[in-house]
Image (spheres, helix red, strand yellow):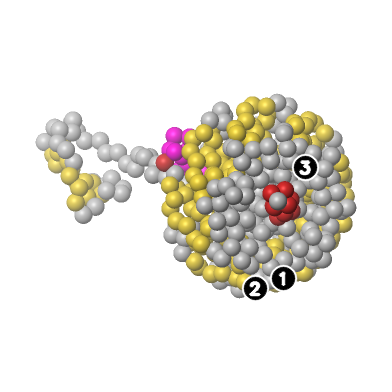
Amino acid sequence: MKRRSISILILCACFVSVAWSQQPAGKCYNSWAQFHRYDMQRWNRCEKVLNVNNVGNLHRKWRYRTGAYVDSSPAVTNGVVYVGSTDGNVYALNAKTGALLWSYTTGGEVDSSPAVANGVVYVGAGTNVYALNAKTGALLWSYTTRGYISGDSSPAVANGVVYVGGSYDDTNVYALNASTGALLWSYTTGGFVYSAPAVANGVVYVGSGDNNVYALNATTGAELWSYTTGNAVDSSPAVANGVVYVGSGDNNVYALNATTGAELWSYTTGNAVDSSPAVANGVVYVGSWDNNVYALNASTGALLWSYPTGYYVASSPAVANGVVYVGSGAFGSPGNLYALNATTGALLWSYTTGYMLVSSPAVANGAVYVGSTDNNVYALNAKTGALLWRYTTGGSVGSSPAVANGVVYVGSDDYKVYAFGLKKGRE
């Protein structure tokens, strides 16, 4: 969540990927275990339940109320939703029911989005990075940075290292041992680091308030290159097919060569781009403070479509199975979550919460999870209408089926009556 941007608003009102250590190559994981997901592209290519045909049936499955704004974006893995709140707590919720499994009270507002790896939840709050047992919430270790950790700089975890940026009196990017919390290295930028790092092919990509995008050696922290935009880079980079995609406060979306930092293209929107891009099937999806969601050709930057939400789009899109999910809202307005056709930009569905949405959605296992500044965490799913089973009789089915005690009974022109298990279709 853009805490700096919200403060401004209040004043105005007056496919390169990195495998996680727990994500073996070649296996598809229908989870959303960190802000960028494990592919650093905010694209769940494993989601097969929700699609353009049934997403219109999304309805609220459960809602969990915290004590304050939920700016944090949820992480979802192993049947648990992990999310922070500005009430200072990290929550672990049953993904199916929303029941509280545990909560942990930190020393500050939890704007940061959790990252989950190898049974540990990593999250920034106040001036600390915390490592919590994913099953119990017990504190394993904490590391104190030099300043407040913004909600935008959510931890990224790769190969046993936690990467996170500091802000509000802290201009550093940190690399911490994921097991012990020991500092491995830090890199000092020229501004606050609101951007969440992305890690791909041994390189950490991150934006800074000094107007630069940095590429750092993931092992040593040495600068490999930097690229200067026209304003602060609060957007978090996405990395795909050797290209880094990132937004800037100068109203532009940039595509940079991941190896050299050379600009490949830029696209100008009507306002600042703090939203973090999602990349899927050769398309870049991103929101802007000009109230629009954009779809850009990943190779050329050409506009494919835009969708006007009517409100600021600080939320970062999530893409799954041909659908783009993104939130929007402004102070004094309701918060809307949208599902858009990824190919055409057509509105498929929308849902209104009690207040603006700046949390970025997570999509996994047929459900969408998102936080809202109405203090709630939402889970939405759909009745899919998918075929459960089919059984072939020896003739036409002449009678109407009857159902009792989980069994389906039906007659057939082959002179037989059939009984099937309702869930499995076994005779």
Name the residue carrying label 1. Answer: 142
Residue 283 appears in view: no
Name the residue carrying label 3. Answer: 249
Looking at the image, which is closer to me, 218 or 322? Answer: 322
The magenta region covers 46-56
> Residue 81 at x, y = what percent?
54, 58
Name the residue carrying label 2. Answer: 139
Which numbered mark, 3 or 1, is in the foreground of this view? 3
Helix, strand or loop for disc 3: loop
CA distance separating discs 3 and 2: 36 Å
Looking at the image, which is closer to me, 246 or 288? Answer: 288
CA distance separating discs 2 and 1: 8 Å
Q: Earlier in the sequence, mark 3 or mark 1?
A: 1
CA distance separating discs 3 and 1: 32 Å
Residue at x 21% of width, y 54% of height: 405
Q: Amino acid at mark 3?
A: Gly
Q: Amino acid at mark 2?
A: Leu
Residue 225 to residue 306: above or below: below
